[in-house]
Amino acid sequence: MNRSELRKKIMTILYQIFLYESDNIEYDVNSVIKENVEIDNDFVNNMVHGVLDNIHDIDKIANKNLKDWTIDRLGKIDQAILRMGIYELCYTDTPEIVTINEAVELSKEYSDEKVKNMINAVLDKIYHGDNKDE
């Protein structure tokens, strides 16, 4: 699997976890990963655990850059895409343009036009801004 395909899996895993949390269903992160990815993959493990371990900081960054909106008002898929993008942009060495493009591509497939534009705008603001490590 290439990284784009793996990001789809990561989005699915995060979506599933966010649903479990909103419905107060117990889960094990590693079990959810194994349900979705046949073989152990460091990129998937690092991204999923990275988003979950840093979710409060990621949400602060998101909310600071969302105009008249908060991340908790977005759909679970949109939250997964935006949180992944912010994590990858702020916490990894993936080239910024790749991160933004991958998030936009996922949102083209899974979100509506308004949300796609919002995700693109937020990630672009973070990329050009000075607030990555807040």
Image: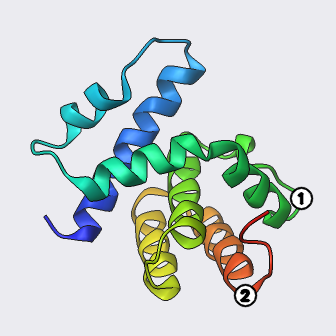
The colour scheme is rainbow
Q: How many marks?
A: 2
- Residue in the foreground of this view, choosing between 48 and 116: 48
The residue identified by callout 1 is 68
Q: Tell me where residue 10 appears, x and y as whole percent.
A: 35, 50
The label shown at residue 4 is: none
Residue 23 to residue 83: above or below: above
Q: Residues within 10 Å of mark 2 (few under 14, many from 20)?
A: few
Residue at point 55% right, 65% down?
91
Percent x, y of residue 122 = 70, 71
Q: Quadrant of the C terminus?
A: bottom right
Amino acid carrying label 2: it is: His
Q: Nearer the viewer, mark 2 or mark 1?
A: 2
Crowding near the residue tagged with mark 1, few <14, some 14–19, many ≥20 C-alpha atoms within 10 Å? few
Q: Circle 1 — which element?
A: loop
Residue highlighted by disc 2? 128
Q: Tell me which numbered mark, 2 or 1, is placed earlier along the sequence.
A: 1
Q: Are marks 2 and 1 in contact (CB under 8 Å)?
A: no
Q: Height in image: 97 above or below 59?
A: below
9 over 25 or under it: above or below: below
Picture residue at 41% right of the left edge, 65% below the top:
106
Please name whichever residue, 119 or 34, is drawn nearer the observer in this view of the structure.
Answer: 34
Q: Tell me the element at label 2.
A: helix
- Taking the image as shown, residue 40 lies to the left or right of residue 59, namely left
Q: Residue at x 67, y 53 (%)?
A: 58
Residue depicted at x 78% and y 52% = 60
> Residue 72's x, y, as percent?
72, 40
Measured Cα–Cα span from mark 2 to mark 1:
20 Å
Q: Which amino acid is tagged 1?
A: Asp
